[in-house]
Amino acid sequence: MRRIQIGWWRMPFVLAFLFLCSMAWPQALQASEEAWRALQEGGTIALFRHARAPGTGDPTNFRLEDCATQRNLSAEGRRQAQAIGEAFRTRRIPVERVLSSRWCRALDTARLAFGALTEPFPPLDSFFEGREQEPARTQAVRRTIQEWRSNGVLVLVTHQVNITALTGIFPAEGEMLVLRPKQDAGFDLVGRIKL
């Protein structure tokens, strides 16, 4: 077994780095717990990027009605989607409605996590290959979030480009942003959860 040696002159930097990591970890954990509490209370939105699907964009022969022509969830992605559903059930999150992009990787994420509640929702479709569609889709999703008035949770499953256009955040695959609609307009970001 090979040992890694750190020069004595680097030790202060290593210790400073470890200290900063130890300070950030509790804050991230606390933010995740706050987001879970907001979901348990309801009236919130769980905005997901689809689970792990290796690659970028879609093949040139992409057809919406044929999953074989699309980038799909890996085995890890399928497990990740199932773990999302299990986390929601374990924490007794009151999911009321689940809307998903019609891309197979998003629908599969939603169905593996939330089952029959899943509904295809075209405004959540990716515009990675059609940036001109961004304003209309983003506005439709923003309106859906702003109009959510329920004691339950609205789950939205979509793509990185859609989430970044809406929030300015670049989420990891399977990452969730918890949003709370404002009374007048817009929404607040309660927190982020990576499962």
Image (tube, rainbow, N blue to C red):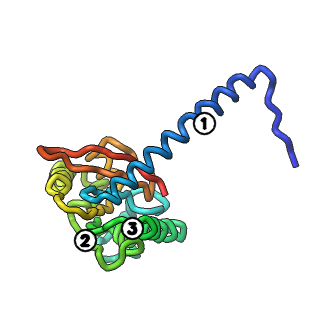
The residue nearer to you, when weighing 164 against 149, is 149
Graded by Cα atoms within 10 Å as few (under 14), some (14 to 19) or many (20 or more), the crowding at tag 3 reads few
Graded by Cα atoms within 10 Å as few (under 14), some (14 to 19) or many (20 or more), the crowding at tag 1 reads few
Label 3 element class:
loop
Disc nearer the start of the sequence (3/2): 3
| Residue at 49 percent of width and 61 percent of height | 54
Against 188, is 13 above or below? above
Mark count: 3
Q: Where is residue 48 in the image (x, y as percent from the top left)?
A: 36, 58
Q: How far apart are marks 3 and 2 (CA)?
A: 24 Å
| Residue at 44 percent of width and 49 percent of height | 32
Pointer 3: what residue?
A: 92
Q: Nearer the viewer, mark 1 or mark 2?
A: 1
The residue nearer to you, when weighing 132 against 3, is 3
Asked if one can make out residue 133 in the rendered structure from this viewpoint, the answer is no
Against 18, is 148 above or below? below
Q: Nearer the viewer, mark 1 or mark 3?
A: 3
| Residue at 39 percent of width and 67 percent of height | 92
Q: Position of residue 9 (x, y in %)?
A: 77, 20
Pointer 1: what residue?
A: 22
Against 72, is 38 above or below? above
Q: Distance between the residues labelled 1 and 3?
A: 30 Å
Pointer 2: what residue?
A: 120
**Amino acid type at image mark 2:** Pro
The residue nearer to you, when weighing 5 against 11, is 11
Disc nearer the start of the sequence (1/2): 1
